[in-house]
Image: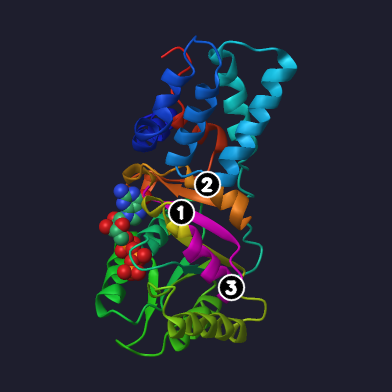
Amino acid sequence: MSVFSRWKEGLSRTSKAAFGQIAAILGASEITNETWDDLETVLIQADVGVETASSILEELKRLTRAEGWIRSDQLFFSLRHELLSRLAPPPEPRFENQPTVILIVGVNGSGKTTTIAKLASRFSDSGRKILLGAADTFRAAAVDQLQVWGDRLNVEVIAGAPESDPGAVAFSAVQAGSARGADIIMIDTAGRLHTRFNLMEELKKVHRVVGKAMAGAPHHVWLVLDATTGQNALQQARSFKDAVNVTGVILTKLDSSAKGGMAFAVRRELDLPILFVGLGERPEDLTPFDPEAFVDGILPKPQE
Ligand SMILES: Nc1nc2c(ncn2[C@@H]2O[C@H](COP(=O)(O)OP(=O)(O)OP(=O)(O)O)[C@@H](O)[C@H]2O)c(=O)[nH]1
Ligand SMILES: [Mg+2]
C-alpha cells in the first residue's frame, strides 16, 4: 500500500464522519451565512476544538472579504491552507545520549505497550540497539505482553516481579541498558487513570528514579493518546503534563476514530508536537506524523 493510501485509509472514519460533508458545503453555491454555520459545525464535530474552529472561520471570512469571493468552492484551498498552518511537522527524534532513555506514559488502553513494540521494531530496523523496561507492574499480564514483543523482535526486556516497585524496574532497565551498550531504552508504564492522584504520584517517582539511574534521563517523555477519545484526551494530557515533563505526543487508533480532528487541539491547546500516529494495528502503521498527508487524508477531494 502506498504511503498516501495508508493515510487516506487510516483517516477514512474522520473523513467520512465529519470532514466529508465539506464537499457538499463547499459546492459551487453562493457563500451565505449558512455556509459559515455549516462549516463551523463540521469542524467542531470533527473535534478540532472550538477555538481552532472559530479561528479558521475568522480567517476564511477575512479572506473572503479581501478577495471578494462569492462562491463557496473558492474557499476550499484556503481551508486546506488554514488547517495545514495549524499543524507542524515533528522534530526529528534526537537520540544523542548514549543510551537515550524514553519514558512512555498514557492512560490504560491508549496503546502504550503496542506502540513501544512498533517503535522498537522501527528503531531496530534503523540499526539501533534497543532495551525495554516493563515498569507496568500493576498488571501481571502487562509484563508478559512486553516480553512476548521482546522475544518476537529479539530485544531484551527488563522486568520485575509482579507488583514490584515500578521505580525499581525502571532503575534496573536504565542500568542494564547502559551496561549493555543500548542506544535506546524505552520504559513502559502502567495505564494511569488521571483521576487517581496516587498513580500520578507514582509516575513522578518513576521519572525521578530514572534520573537517579542516569543524570539527565529520561531524555524524552512521550504521551500516548487514544484518538478515539477526542477532546477527553486533552484533559488527560494536561494531567500528565502537570505530573511529568511530557515532550511529545503519539496519537494512536486514528484508524478507529472519527475524531482525528483532535490533532489540531493537541497542537493548539497542549503545545506539544505530535511525533507519531497509529493508522492501524500493524507495525508499519505507526508512522511519523505528516501534516500534509494528514490534511489531505481528512479532506475530500475538491471536485468530489
Ligand atoms: N486500530 C488500532 N489499534 C491500536 C493502535 N494502537 C494500539 N491499538 C490497540 O489498542 C489496544 C490496547 O493497546 P495496548 O498497547 O495494550 O495499550 P496500553 O496503553 O499498553 O494499555 P495498558 O497496559 O492497559 O495501560 C490493543 O488491542 C492494540 O492493538 C492503532 O493505532 N490502531
Ligand atoms: Mg500496556
Q: Position of residue 219 (x, y in %)?
A: 62, 69
Answer yes or no: is residue 154 visible: no
Circle number at residue 111? none
Residue drawn at 51 percent across, 34 percent down: 40
Q: Amino acid at mark 2?
A: Gly
Q: CA distance from mark 1 to mark 3?
A: 18 Å
Q: Amino acid at mark 3?
A: Asp
Q: Is residue 160 magenta?
A: no
Q: Position of residue 131 (x, y in %)?
A: 45, 70
Q: Which residue is mark 3?
A: 242
Q: Residue furthest front?
A: 33
**Mark 2 Cα shell of 10 Å, populated few (<14), some (14-19), many (≥20):** many
Pointers 1 and 3 in contact (C-beta within 8 Å): no
- Confirm or reject: label 3 Cβ below 8 Å from ligand 1: no
Residue drawn at 70 percent across, 22 percent down: 63
Q: Is residue 68 above or below residue 46?
A: above
* Helix, strand or loop for disc 1: loop
Q: Is residue 177 above or below residue 303?
A: below
Q: Where in the image, quadrant-wise, is ligand 1 located? A: bottom left
Q: Position of residue 268 (x, y in %)?
A: 62, 50
**Which sits earlier in the primary sequence, circle 1 or circle 2?**
2
| Quadrant holding the C terminus | top left
Q: Position of residue 245 (x, y in %)?
A: 61, 70
Residue drawn at 36 percent across, 60 percent down: 111
Q: CA distance from mark 1 to mark 2?
A: 7 Å
**Which sits earlier in the primary sequence, circle 3 or circle 2?**
2
**Mark 3 Cα shell of 10 Å, populated few (<14), some (14-19), many (≥20):** few
Circle number at residue 231? 1
* Helix, strand or loop for disc 3: helix
Q: Amino acid at mark 1?
A: Gln
